[in-house]
Image: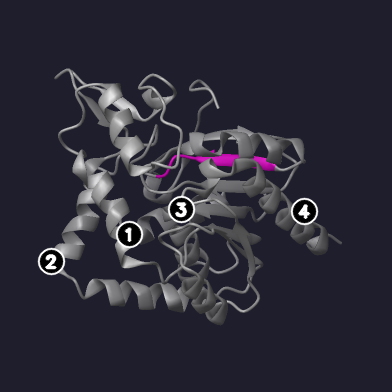
Amino acid sequence: MPDTDTTILIGHRGQAIAASIRGDNAGLPVILAHGGGQTRRAWRNTADRLAKCGFCAVAIDMRGHGESAWAEDGAYDIRDFASDLVALAQACRQRPALIGASLGGLAGIIAEGNIRPQTFSSLTLVDVTPQMDPKGIARVVGFMAAHARNGFASPEEAAHIIAEYMPHRRKQSGSTGLHHYLRFRSDGRYYWHWDPAFIEGIVSIKETHPESNSLRRSIFDSAASSLKLPVHLIRGDASDLVSPSAVSLFKALVPHAEISDIAGATHMVVGDKNDIFTDAILEFLIKTYHDASP
């Protein structure tokens, strides 16, 4: 998805959401919502394959990420992200399918199960459930928070930090695609593309209201148990966030959900095993769309 291929969509309360759109406008819309700290570029290969199969892929930058506007009021609660998804879905000519990774998946659960049922035609969750491992969450949050304000001296420094965080991935140079995720500022340093207020809000809540974890979990459980649409959970079998027991708990909440385990993939399923991941997505969507067609 080249940088010039940007359409600005309107989210909740006028929030500017950057998107790349692939495929036939007559095809079933498929909204692709990335995880925290990512951008719509994470979906570029998947979006192209969806388009070739007749779907209209709409890959978005979540609020405060990538080319989307930062929330001036610091509105980065999960309901804010979910409300953006509802607004985008309502602008589609038919109910879209939603594919949400991590943050995008949690927002999808709240959007469909809590804010506005029947918003989507199907929901695919990428390595995310209401019951995720606290240690895994802490590792992700810690990585994102560590350089949110002070940035990096160079892209190479950022590449080194990423390699330490994801040792299973082949280390890339600071110039290999990393410029899409960094912003160079007048102080001569490089910063993540996302609004630091996003992660700082998460850290603040965890530190000042530790009881909020159980409350939020109960909210997600309730929303998940309300899901009536076709649901597909894709999990990396080496994930440190979604354990087999978390999958079992999710199946208890959403008995009709289909489960796909991707061998050799971590929480970063899309990047780890993109071809296998996209095969699983297409199989589910084609079957679901075919079954729903008159």
Near mark 3 (Cα within 10 A), the count class, few <14, some 14-19 or many ≥20, is many
Q: Which mark is nearer the camera, 4 or 1? A: 1
Instruction: Answer yes or no: is residue 183 visible.
Output: yes
Dot 4: what SS? helix
The residue lying furthest to the bottom in this view is 252
Residue at image point 14% right, 63% down: 207
Query: Residue 5 in the image: x percent, y percent?
Result: 54, 24
Q: Which residue is mark 1?
A: 137
Q: Amino acid at mark 4?
A: Ile
Residue at image point 41% right, 72% down: 131
Q: Which residue is mark 3?
A: 267
Query: Residue 120 in the image: x percent, y percent?
Result: 61, 60
Q: Amino acid at mark 2?
A: Thr
Start-end of magenta stretch: 56-62
Q: Which residue is mark 2?
A: 208
The residue closer to the viewer here, 191 or 139, is 139
Q: Which residue is mark 4?
A: 286
